[in-house]
Amino acid sequence: MYAITIPEPGGPEALVWAEVPDPVPGEGEVLVEVVSSAVNRADLLQRQGFYNPPPGSSPYPGLECAGRIAAIGPGVAGWSVGDEVCALLVGGGYAEKVVVPAGQLLPVPRGIDLATAAALPEVTCTVWSNVFMIAHLRPGETFLVHGGSSGIGTMAIQLAKAVGAKVAVTAGTKEKLDFCAELGADILINYREQDFVEEIRENTAGGGADVILDNMGAKYLNRNVDALAVNGRLAIIGMQGGIKGELNIATLLGKRGAITATTLRARPLAEKAAVVAAVREHVWPLIEGGHVRPIVDRTLPMSDAAQGHRVLEESGHIGKVLLTLP
């Protein structure tokens, strides 16, 4: 088969479409013929040599895919050859074929075409696990998501609105904020021109945000705590703003706040299977009912994955960038 390889870490040009051995499904796994994958920030880090896949997993980038089951390994029940699926991956989505643990498979939601389904697994699992399973966002609470126009952000807005939360977003342009408003965002904050801490306080009568989903890490750490409500929960899922920051413990104590930080890739199989099962139970009905939809900025040939990486690095996109195979 062919896959996007990374012979040496570097810029987008480091991604090479090359012939590699076919993967073989083992115990509890299935082989998926890939129709599409999607570009995630973690793929950019892997390309740069900063986020290597766990030992024993596929060396190729790609944390999600959609396609058809081509073969089933021992010990797998409930799936058949030919089933159309999308999947959460530990890697290997930028390829013609990929092996997937059966617990990380999802059926393609009714009303969503197969190629577009690749835009769903990573964002739905990330948002549902962090915002709802860990931070326990509840109806009537105020939710702030940084990078509201990203793949994660566009899904977070929709899911938070679906459960009855008030949604605030940050983004860097009017176009992006307008799109967030179309998805249901209530509080629109241009981080280039406005202070999100002040805006959150002003729009919550000084109360603050009950849950914050943060992709920036160190740069926003103290400001996020300042923006929290009493009993607020900060969920950190990225480090675009650095990895080391100072935290005002007194402010956190005064707010009785909580900070969590998670990734999906390195979690044990059982944990990822539990997240996927929760997404199938809670999110899939919202998608099939038309309340939530994947947002796709553009679709590119998988062999041109380098261009997909450039798009994310320039931050000119809204929603997901997909990579497709003929």
Image (cartoon, rainbow, N blue to C red):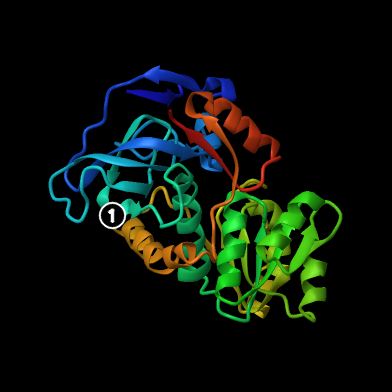
Q: Residue at x 82, y 61 (%)?
A: 195
Residue 23: image location, x then y, percent:
26, 31
Task: Identify whether 31 is placed above or below 275.
Answer: above
What residue is rendered at 45% in x and 63% in y? 288
On screen, residue 149 versus residue 28, left or right, reads right
Q: Report x, y in % for residue 82.
A: 25, 43
State which quarter of the image contains the N terminus.
top left
Characterize the local packing of mark 1: few (<14), some (14-19) or many (20 or more) Cα atoms within 10 angstroms.
Answer: many
Disc 1 designates what residue? Answer: 103
- The answer, for residue 86, to whether it is visible in the render is yes
Q: Is residue 52 above or below residue 213?
A: above
**Residue at 59% of width from left, 64% of height from top?**
158
Spot occupied by residue 152 in the image (x, y as percentages of width and height): 57, 54
Q: Identify the secondary structure beneath mark 1.
A: helix
In the rendered image, which quarter contains the C terminus?
top left
Residue under the image location 76 percent in, 56 percent down = 177
> Quick one: which residue is furthest to the right in this view?
193
Q: Is residue 67 left or right of residue 83?
A: right
Return the residue found at the far front: 111
In this orientation, which residue lies closer to the viewer: 31 or 117? 117
Where is residue 290? Give x, y as percent. Answer: 52, 64
